[in-house]
Amino acid sequence: MKVLVVGSGGREHVICSCAAKSEKVDKVYCAPGNAGIEQVAECAPIGAMEFDKIVAFAKEKEIDLVIVGMDDPLVGGLVDELEAAGIRAFGPRKNAAILEGSKAFSKDLMKKYNIPTAAYENFTDPDAAIKYLETAKFPIVLKADGLALGKGVLICENFEEAKAGVKEIMLDKKFGSAGNEMVIEEFMTGREVSVLTFVDGSTIKTMTSAQDHKRAGDGDTGLNTGGMGTFSPSPFYTPEIEKFCEEKIFQPTVDAMKAEGREFKGIIFFGLMLTEDGPKVLEYNCRFGDPEAQVVLPRMKNDLIEVAEACIDGRLDEIDLQFENNAAVCVVLASEGYPVSYEKGIPISGLDEFEKHDGYYCFHAGTKLVDGQFVTNGGRVLGITAKGSDLKEARANAYAATEWVQFANKYKRNDIGKAIDEA
């Protein structure tokens, strides 16, 4: 069969790699892809939001399955457009992708169906938001309602910061139309855990757990980013916590979406906070996380294409989802200055080293080829992933592998997975 993956980052690189390994797949395409993805798939210069061109390309190439990796096209309704053209697609339809597309919707859904989450209020009027904040308990969290590349969340320590945050999100529109509505949420403390799941509308199956590091700097300092690294599994996600989440969070979310007439098929990413009062939902995403996919999918024993097709056909209950009994760590190599401003076009060396070592991976996020030379082409450039028998070994392996790669303005956090030492 022929598979088309939509997206251009490290997440899409690992999805394409999994598709290329499937015995069911003869050919993998990616739109638009990147220089690393070109090593395992044929890339087409079509933007992820160019729905008409994607549908036309899928028809022309007689694509059997489209996997939509990115949030924007899912929330925008690409799966609906593909299905209308008779093309099988893996990912939620537009009316289900709202689970990620609107934080206000997802918070209201959790309240209605008693799914544990932080206390909150939704606002469309900035003056009303500021009035509410005058009597609020700090610190407090402000969230732009819509998609903001993982950056539309502000943690405010006092009223002045919060007032400035309302201006930033709702008046200055720093995150564009995502800030037309805003969620003001109770600040929760505890360990964060990410759990990716496959969903077929009724059945939900969890993948191995992971933990992301969002802040740009060591010690969780600096600005929010798309993710600076991750590890899997999380030692804090115990069997007891897993059982609670399956009964009180995971299955209830799938059932709630079905009850609302928004049957969800695809990936639900549960961002969880392990609070003193038990696990609570921080956020939902409707696709593989990036860089969570880079540590979860390399550990999955199943054929990704088989699982995706089972989700589409509503027979996920037939799949015995299995993961290797090991660990993986991903360290993102970024361009100095990310996520604000950074230089592009800088030559990268050392990538051929990964071909010599099993259990080591280099997933491209922001690269391109210029005259046969890989150069930087984004803020997050590469995701260096390594496996190990346990988390400490995987972490040591991943950091060793980051030294194989060189480019002039290379930047990384040095404490990805450091929490492992405290487990």
Image (cartoon, rainbow, N blue to C red):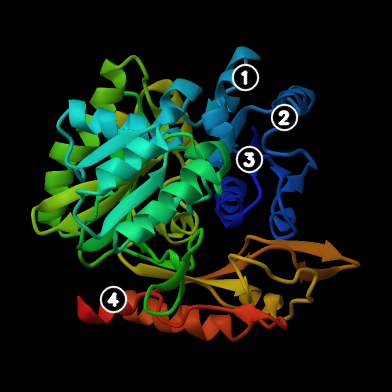
Residue 2: image location, x then y, percent: 67, 34
Tag 1 and tag 2, C-beta contact below 8 Å: yes
Q: Disc 1 or 3, which lies upstream in sequence?
A: 3
**Callout 3 crowding tier (Cα within 10 Å): few <14, some 14–19, many ≥20:** many
Residue 68 in the image: above or below residue 88: below
Give amino acid for label 3: Val
In depth, the one of 283 and 37 nearer the eye is 283
Q: Are marks 4 and 3 in contact (CB under 8 Å)?
A: no
Q: CA distance from mark 4 to mark 2?
A: 42 Å
Q: Is residue 86 visible?
A: yes
- The Cα–Cα distance between marks 3 and 2, rounded to whole angstroms, is 10 Å
Which residue does the numbered mark 4 point to in the structure image? 419
Mark 3 highlights which residue? 5
Residue carrying label 1: 81
Q: Earlier in the sequence, mark 4 or mark 2?
A: 2
Q: Nearer the viewer, residue 379 or 341?
A: 341
